[in-house]
Image: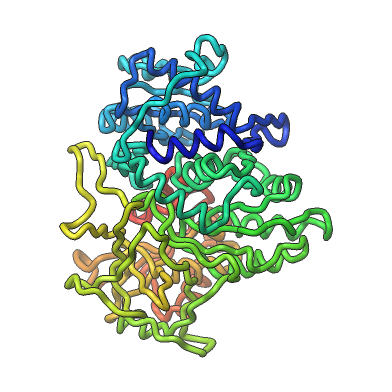
Amino acid sequence: MSRFVDDVSAIAARARTGMVTGEPGEPFRRTWTELHALARRIAGRLARSGLRPGQAVAVLAGAPVEIAPVAQAIWLAGGSMTMLHQPTARTDLEVWRDDTLRVLKMIDARVVVIGSPFEPMAPVLEAHGIAYHLAAGLMADPAAGGPADFTPVDAPEDFPALLQLTSGSTAEPKAVRITHRNLWSNLHDAATHLRSDESGVMVSWLPMFHDMGMVGCLLLPMISGMELVSVTPADFLGRPLLWAELMSRHHATITTAPNFAWAVLTRQLARVPDGTLDFSTLQIAGNGAEPIDPSTMEAFIAAGARFGMRPEAIQCCYGAAESTLVISLSEMADSMLLDVVDAPALESDRRAVPSGASAGVRRLPKLGRPCSTVEVRVAGEDGRTLGDREVGRIMLRGDSVTEGYLTPAGYEPARDADGWLDIGDEGYLVDGQVVVCGRRKDVIIMGGRNIYPTDIERAAATVPDVRSGNVAAVRLTAGDDRARESFAVLVESRAAGDPEAEERVGREVISRIVAEIEVRPAAVKVLPPGSLPKTPSGKLRRAAARSLL
């Protein structure tokens, strides 16, 4: 069998650790051994119902207690798994239905597994003749799930394991084809670097339809034997302090989340009395999946110190679904390392020139050295490999990196003739470490400067009444009634709806951007909370936000 399945099976045979779900109301613990036995029964049921090696299974579920054994069962049976985008209270169900049917056709899904709380979606699939299983039915009766001694399929290394939907528009779906080789290579790299083993405890609330939630916060514990405490995004968003309480109660050694979540948690910790929580066991507090704001992590370091957290626990990382998950990780012994560079040189000369000044600079996190199975180079527009501190296109290749995508039009290769994949980011290398400046498609070009929207968004977010993490700087191209390229800024604020308050917020946003970035937006739009379009994993959709102007 593949090295990935082999290692998962080996951990199940020896580990006394496992997975805790149901916190805080009804905690339920299942050891990795017990989970594996359940997965083998489910795999037998899937195989008997017609699943063949190499075929795709889609999963629509939100409960970690169901997702984990179902996912493992699919791999034991030789199938590939796709976590479907999940409808929310604000989702137009007709649009979701059409998008989901488009995805199922694209990946050629033979069956869908539906779990809590999405069972009401079953009639939609049934009406379109799509076969499905309810996760509860697969798990409820051991005898119905197939024999516990089901023999795992001997899947080749280049068989697909994950068809990971990208974070783009669901109306134009694309799935990254992750093989068993990709998966094992990336997980082995991450486990080695993070020293993951049965002595570790991970706490996570990340969604498992996102690569960081699935690969980093389910499969990494599953393959390394770490104890996993897993709750849902809704649990975190409903009461963010739950995350901190679980870290303290379970003596977490590792947790990870995108930048916005650390900002939310820092604000919550300000209300917690000294000594109430214990972060002293935390060895890794990872920040990834979206641009890292150094000020956010500096604030968290200060807040966490009251509860025994060490600054060197901060782990800045860089990843993408195209590299399975991880591209680079900062060193375990380092606190957050910043590259302070001259802003004009970065924007106009495309060079990251170190600066000791306090103004006119950009503070960019160093994201560590690439993993052993991910080679990184930075290329110019002519394809030439650039040197240290020269800004260009970030390119990837190696055993962790996908060969291609599934699209509605068919398979789409992702690499060039030399095996390089253009990840779509701009950045540079310094002393072997990766530094990311931003997404190339979002760069705003004004007066010969390449301005990254994250810099504008962070400046705007410092204005009182603007919701941090809910600002979008969108590119306005030259043409029509615009003589040159410019940009607009959309901010969410509870001041929306009050014309005088909106005008005040708009003026302050312009003032802050001009002071810090030395450019003036063509427009500022103040929106109510929840207005900005985001991907299913919570990332801003800047192109879609432009329609709100």
Does 80 sit left or right of 368 as displayed? left
For the N terminus, the quadrant is top left
What residue do we see at 62% from left, 53% from top? 254
Is residue 259 in view from this perspective? Answer: no
Q: Is residue 204 above or below residue 455?
A: above
Determine the image quadrant of residue 423.
bottom left
Residue found farthest to the top: 143
Q: Pick the residue in front: 418 or 488.
A: 418
What residue do we see at 77% from left, 55% from top? 278
Q: Is residue 409 above or below residue 518?
A: above
Q: Pick the residue in front: 48 or 541.
A: 48
Is residue 10 in view from this perspective? Answer: yes
Give percent across and percent down for residue 266.
67, 60
Q: Pick the residue in front: 10 or 173.
A: 10
Please name the colour scheme applied to the rendered image: rainbow
Give percent across and percent down for residue 204.
60, 45
What residue do we see at 67% from left, 31% from top? 29
Give percent across and percent down for residue 467.
56, 58
Number of numbered markers: 0
Does 175 sit left or right of 231 as displayed? left
Determine the image quadrant of residue 436.
bottom left
Q: Pick the residue in front: 91 or 240.
A: 240
Q: Is residue 101 above or below residue 166?
A: above
For the C terminus, the quadrant is bottom left
Give percent across and percent down for residue 217.
54, 45
What residue do we see at 46% from left, 31% from top? 71
Q: Is residue 375 above or below residue 181?
A: below
Determine the image quadrant of residue 98.
top left
